[in-house]
Image (cartoon, grey):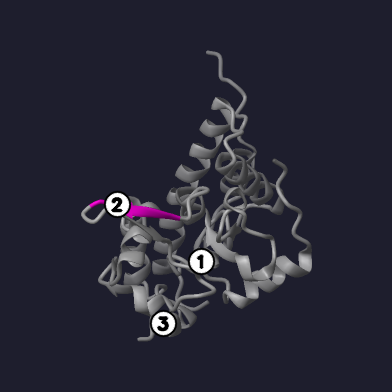
Amino acid sequence: MNTSTPFNPAYEEIIKFIASGVTPQSLVEFQVSETVKERVAELIFREKNETLSTEEKSELDHYMVLEHLLRLAKAHAYEFITEE
Amino acid sequence: MDRPYLNKELRRLVASRADFLCEYCLIEEKYTALGCTIDHIISIKHGGSSDADNLAYCCVFCNRFKGSDIGSIVWKNKEFIRFYHPRWDNWSEHFQLDDSHIQPLTTIGEVTARILGFNDQPRLLERRILISKKRYPSSSAINKMNL
């Protein structure tokens, strides 16, 4: 089966984060790198100024899904932490 | 149009001035994964500057939904209403937290909540869980909500 290379750089970070073993504590502390944050900010800015390609729009859509998923997971993780 | 360069010092000022909260929906940055971005309150398209008084700390959802808009129309009286402006306005005058909903109290609050998607289903779900874990509103958000 052919699997395409993910073009979304956040995937790699998140996949490595999961693969290395997630604890509730590491999850609540998790944030993507400055590089990915910068990429998201760039895409949002360019969307505002109507210079986003279809692929980039799809990339930004993926970030939004990841953000939602991780916000939920991070919030739930507090169930398993007694103190910060 | 190139994205204006905002130096580290200016970014730090915007973040700390906001107490690391999104200045619109008041989620604290640490409960996000992508962090917060810096929003031009009046978009560059509409002549907004990159001075500190036109910048706001803003989560990725609020920032993306806001786009380059500066307000919206209220159709019943065909009136254009500007968005909530974090530097000019008090949050608690325009919004009120009602369970997990951010209820608008004014027309400014109404257009802002609608366009920025404050009460879209995914965000209500996030807020509901954060509230149940006592992570929203955070202590500095409580101040802004005037609770």
Residue type, label 3: Ile
For mark 1, give the secondary structure: loop
Q: Residue at x 59, y 28 (%)?
A: A53
The reply to whether discs 2 and 3 touch (Cβ–Cβ < 8 Å) is: no
Which quadrant holds residue A39?
A: top right
The residue marked by circle 3 belongs to what chain?
Answer: B
Q: How many marks?
A: 3
Q: Please tell me the numbered disc located at residue B22.
A: 1
Q: Residue at x 41, y 75 (%)?
A: B91
Q: Which residues are magenta?
A: B71-75
- Image height of B74 relative to A51, above or below: below
Q: Residue furthest front?
A: B78
Residue at mark 2 to residue at mark 3: CA–CA distance: 23 Å
Q: Nearer the viewer, residue A81 or B36?
A: B36
Residue B47 located within the stretch drawn in magenta:
no
Q: Viewed as shown, does residue B80 lie left or right of B40?
A: left
- Image height of B44 relative to A9, above or below: below
Q: Please tell me the numbered disc located at residue B121.
A: 2
| Same-subunit check for callouts 2 and 3 | yes
Residue at mark 2 to residue at mark 1: CA–CA distance: 18 Å
Q: Which residue is mark 3?
A: B142
At which x and y percent is residue A29?
A: 58, 64
| Same-subunit check for callouts 1 and 3 | yes
